[in-house]
Amino acid sequence: MRYEAPTTSKEAATLMANAKGKAFVLAGGTDLLVRLKSGAIDPDLIVDIKRIEATQSISRTANGFRIGAAVSGAAMGNHSALTKAWPGVVEATNLIGSDQIQGRCTMAGNMCNASPAADSVPALVAASAKVAIVGPNGRRSVAAENVATGPGKTSLAKGEFVEAITLPKRAPRSADAYLRFIPRTEMDIAVVSAGINLTISAAGVITKARVALGAVAATVLLVPKAARAIIGTKLDDKALAKLAAACEAACKPINDMRGTIEFRTDVAGVLGRRAAKIAYQRAGGK
Amino acid sequence: MAHDTSFTNQEFKIIGTRPERPDGVDKVTGRARYGADASAPGQLIARILRSPHAHATIRKIDTSKAEKLKGVKAVLTSKDLPDLTNGNQGNFDILENCMARDRALYDGHAVAAVAAIDEDTAKKALKLIKVDYKILPHVTDVDLAMQDDAPIVQPRIRHNDAPSNIAQVSEFGHGDVDEGFEKADVIIEKSYKTEQTHQGYIEPHACLATVGPDGQGELWVTTQGHYTFRNICASLLGMELAKLKVTSSEIGGGFGGKTHVWMEPVALALSRKVNRPVKLVMSRNEVFRASGPTCSTSVDVKIGAKKNGTITAASATLRYQDGPFPAIWGMLGAMTSWACYDLKNVKSKAYDVLVNRPKVAAYRAPSAPMAAFAVESTIDLVAAEIGMDPVEFRIKNAAKKGTRASYGPTYGPIGIGPTLQAVKKHPHMRAKLGPNQGRGMACGFWFNFGGQTCTDLNIGVDGTINLTIGTVDVGGSRASMSLIAAEELGIPYDQIKCNVADTSSLGHNDTTEGSRGTFSSGMATIFAARDAIKVMCERAAKEWEIDVKDVEWKDGSAVAKGVRNSNLAPMTLKEIAAKSGATGGPIAGHNEVVADGAGVSFASHICDVEVDPETGGTKVIRYTVIQDAGKAIHPDYVEGQFQGGAAQGIGWALNEEYVYGEDGRLQNPSFLDYRMPVCSDLPSIDTEILEIPNPDHPYGIRGVGETSIVPPLAAVGNAVSMAAGVRMNHVPMSPPRILKAIKEKQAQG
Amino acid sequence: MAGVHVSTTINGDATEFVCHPAETLLDVLRDRLGLTGSKEGCGTGDCGACSVTVDGQLVCSCLVLGAEVSGATVDTIEGMAVGNKLHPLQERFIEHAALQCGVCTPGFLVAGKALLDRNPNPTEEEIRYALAGNLCRCTGYDKIVTAVSAAAKDVRKQQNRKKR
């Protein structure tokens, strides 16, 4: 096995594209090293992207935020402007593991590991995040919901890697929230999760909304019906009930050692309601 | 063995204070050495190949490719481990568990081992070993294993004249339960199930083994009993006891799981095969699959009581799985079930059942928590049915001095009544509860054990003392032993240095289990100190030229008694020690004892929980442990045992379980999905130490380490019942199970 | 597999080693450098017994490759005491009996120090959540939280003294 730490994206893409055998990207390593040690993967090449300047920082542009692929959860949590604009995305990422894991884990890695229960992804999908991908044929931008294609699988081609994740410009009176259910208070993989992003009018009516559910299907589910249930409302009980029902109806969960189908379905509706309330309050709704 | 009971009036000067432990600095600086922290020049790294099947015949193992891999020095299968057990079935079972012979009996069962120059090579070598398995039907559930058509785990086991997985049936009790139930106004009958849990010690099994061509060997190992490990390893490998020196490393948690060998004989055998040190460390995955978790169980309880609260009859049927080898865990469950209560008519019947899961080992008060969950939950149900307060109901029926215990003996003075009275008075019982919160309490019991022990006490010429014990220190007992020696000798605590000897340096000591460490080594330390005091008094008497009968030991000095000796100033230990070379040589005390009369220890716990009614998410928000310690030698460490046991019980109650698939494989052999409590899951755990002295110990000590894990399952269950209005009969009470129960109750309207 | 040559700083000392590309920082510390204070409890980042800091950031060393710390500063439990002087956390852990078997203690001390370095006045809840990545099976965490609170007081006192 070889370890390389290139200093430019082009170098990294070239290494990945030309690799004979299996090549893997290393950012935080909190998923990769676990798979490596368990024997689940047997890499020929590991490309550490942390020394590439384009992956290292959070920057604010006219079009929103750009978060480099190597930026850790801890660094995101320490960024006050990002936390203020996107509390849901930040809290989702900050829920991954312990403080030790937070010092290393990244949204990009979380997304590309493509676990159906990844914490950052429902929030990123609800936020309409875009993923900047670099490959041997240049750059492309992909919607967050189109990266994972199934458990452990992504739409990235050989030689491609994620350089950054961008969040769009924030409209006024907008906020997001992320909730997950875990049996303990920390350290568990989400049994079911919900990410909600919304914008409200000056009168407190929801004008835009996106609802995404995690851990209830092979990939994160965007649930337009749940969003429609609350758009045009002030999030009264009837709207919340419709939202919950839409979330439950959209679920395609499995039975596994973390949860049953019934449990995940029930709790998806509960978390949808609760996350919507939090996002609404954060956006200024009463 | 009765002792001078004047201790009950004794004012202890040093016992009961809270000095710092001797191994503290080493442990906070990373200097302390645990099982995997030792290395030897030229050492090989060993790894074990494990069966991926729950039950399979091993037709053939081809190790030829592995043996040829560059860097591999030895490969081992059961062919290299001849049966030297001479018909001793227990030892044969241990041998077979360390290395499968003709069958793999569980997912994770060792089938081969390699020793190579590094871990990478060892891992590659394992991949080159070809095992030809014939998969057999398996059974992992205790109830299914008892059915007539269940796959048979051990063909030699028979029950009712047919091959069976029922290895043993035991019964305890007295009186006539049928008659007792006739007399009852109220009868509650209920069934319960508890899933398998693991002790969860943070340090995996690890050892460094060296055996030379002359048959002499050394083993550095994390263990709760280095003498027991020596005896077993030597026996299985045909080595002589005196020539196998076993040194206990610092131990990173055991709780009963490190009282058995799991892989140490394999490490020694590899080393012997190739004459090089062999280091063998289990991964966490292996710890879960191939060490010794506790039983999963299925228990039926029936209690009958009069309207005035007197229990007229109590019976329990218990089904405990032992893994693939017969053991006594069910029997222990039957013995502990009714121990808290004074019952005229009581019966417990237990089945020890074999399944295709790892061999069960002791886990802190083994077998008691599951039985207590069933009994203490039902006690609450009976109290509710009668309309009596659950604490008062227990007080009315609590065992006391003179009670004939359900498992046989008659109790001396015991703590169950006092702990219940303390519960009543405790401020926790009056704390206000908020919405979705509930409170429960439960009682627990453990026997505690004595056992073989010996101790050396050597006095240096400067008056400082080496106290050498043979019980492994799992939680601070070196400090407690030093306190005891200091108390006996009447000298400051810090004049004593306590060490755990290796097997070559001290006689046999039984394992640190059964809460016997402080009790037994403490007893031996007291007598060793008194032995040394005798010698010192003789030295003083000789120097003073008086009769030794006129010399007594007081406040750390030899004192000449009597008016005619009043001109003789007391001789301190330091002074006597300084002269020892000239007065007869080094001064020492020694004691060997089979410590007997370990006192039973009772506890009552109070638990508050909050249950989210929409998700079943449950959190313990307040917890109190009240337990009888007999005499608390070092109160900090007694509290620590109370809190640690309670935390394990809470994890067991809420989230910990082994999950097996249809294929008989363990699905969650990691800390990610075997969910032990983390720091944010728990509240502060309040403790109250009661002291009802044990008349069979010179200081009144009772074992304390185990009882604390017994009440939490039911305490949590009773609290959940109040918080969410549902009675849980399946442990762990994980959120999906609680939510299901809540929804079922809602559906019933 | 060709080895990777790494130059780094460990507990303030310039350190060089050669390791396999797939070797973790934990393996390097324990098996190549003899620094066995950091423990392997699980190897998957779930127990925190291997906690160290890399460039001041608390991490699980079992999830960092040895190759990654080239040019970085690594601090382990062995570097926590300054000469003869124990860190307040180390002293308070002993004083409050915050350890029983002690195997998780190095991880807790490193994580506790990382907490107090960024927040010297944590509430009980903040302490419990900051230490959620460190498993202890012996103590039930109660005395650990007490010890960290007590050490936090010491750290605040030290900081106030420095300010004057």
Image (spheres, helix red, strand yellow):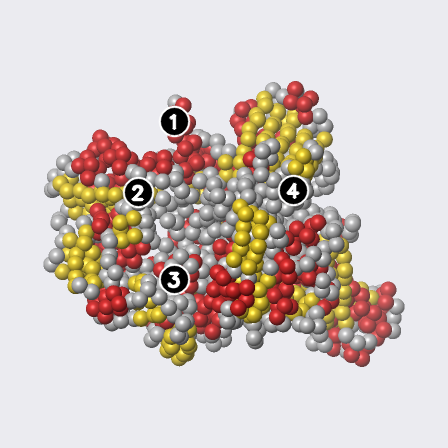
Determine the CA span between mark 4 and mark 1: 48 Å
Please name the residue that numbered disc 1 is placed on: B746
Say which mark, if any, is on residue A177.
Answer: none
Which label lies toward us, 3 or 2?
3
Please name the residue that numbered disc 3 is placed on: A42
Could you tell me the amino acid type at mark 4? Answer: Pro
Determine the CA span between mark 3 and mark 2: 28 Å
Please name the residue that numbered disc 2 is placed on: A217
Q: Secondary structure at mark 2?
A: loop
Where residue A241 sits in the image (x, y, percent)?
A: 25, 32
The answer to the question of whether label 4 and label 2 lie on touching residues, with beta carbons closer than 8 A, is no
Residue, x 17% and y 37% (percent of image)?
A: A228
Asked if residue B542 shows in the view, the reply is yes
Asked if residue B526 shows in the view, the reply is no
The answer to the question of whether label 4 and label 1 lie on touching residues, with beta carbons closer than 8 A, is no
Determine the CA span between mark 4 and mark 2: 45 Å
The answer to the question of whether label 3 and label 1 lie on touching residues, with beta carbons closer than 8 A, is no
Please name the residue that numbered disc 4 is placed on: B155
Residue, x 64% and y 61% (percent of image)?
A: B80
Which label lies toward us, 4 or 1?
4
Q: Chain of mark 3?
A: A
Q: Nearer the viewer, residue B667 or B539?
A: B667
Where residue B736 sits in the image (x, y, percent)?
A: 41, 38
Residue, x 33% and y 67% (percent of image)?
A: A45
Residue, x 52% and y 60% (percent of image)?
A: B129
Determine the CA span between mark 3 and mark 4: 41 Å
